[in-house]
Image (cartoon, helix red, strand yellow):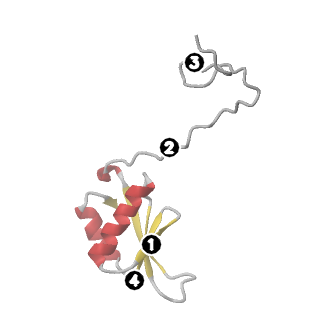
Amino acid sequence: MNRDNHKNDRNGDGRVVYSTNPDFRVEADAPREPLTPDPTRQRLRVALDSRQRAGKTVTVISGFVGAAADLNDLARLLKGRCGVGGSVKDGDIIMQGDLKEKITTILRAAGYGVK
């Protein structure tokens, strides 16, 4: 029998059922990142943007669904293949320059649906 200051009785879904410890606090599970679906199930949008960028054109890739690490890996792949700088911000990949056609070709070759 467990004689600690709190019981670790758990019901089927993993929640604490009862505790005798007055200082006991239930810790919420960390939010899990969504699983990244297969590239053939992804529908990415490639667009040009120059608003609020001092007149410079950038290519924005949006619509990616999945883990942040996978989004960063895709950005790294595109930056390496295009030979330009870029970043990931708010779930979008932002690449320097007008690379719409080149990025569309690279994404389609990787199996992504491109719009």
What's the residue type where badge 4 is placed?
A: Gly
CB of mark 4 within 8 Å of CB of mark 3?
no
Percent x, y for residue 10? 58, 20
Q: Is residue 76 left or right of residue 57?
A: left
Q: Is residue 67 visible?
A: yes
- The alpha-carbon separation of the residues under discs 1 and 2 comes to 23 Å
What's the residue type where badge 2 is placed?
A: Arg
Q: Is residue 106 left or right of residue 98?
A: left
Q: Is disc 4 surrounded by few (<14), some (14 to 19) or many (20+) residues within 10 Å?
A: some
Q: Helix, strand or loop at disc 4?
A: loop
What's the residue type where badge 1 is placed?
A: Ser
Q: Nearer the viewer, mark 1 or mark 4?
A: 1
- The alpha-carbon separation of the residues under discs 1 and 4 comes to 12 Å
What's the residue type where badge 3 is placed?
A: Asn
Dot label at residue 32:
2
Q: Quadrant of the N terminus?
A: top right
Percent x, y for residue 61? 42, 67
- Pointer 1 or 2: first along the chain: 2
- The alpha-carbon separation of the residues under discs 4 and 2 comes to 34 Å
Residue indicated by mark 1: 87
Exactly how many numbered labels are in the figure? 4
- The alpha-carbon separation of the residues under discs 4 and 3 comes to 55 Å
Looking at the image, residue 71 lies above or below residue 83: above
Dot label at residue 11:
3
Q: Is residue 91 left or right of residue 29?
A: left
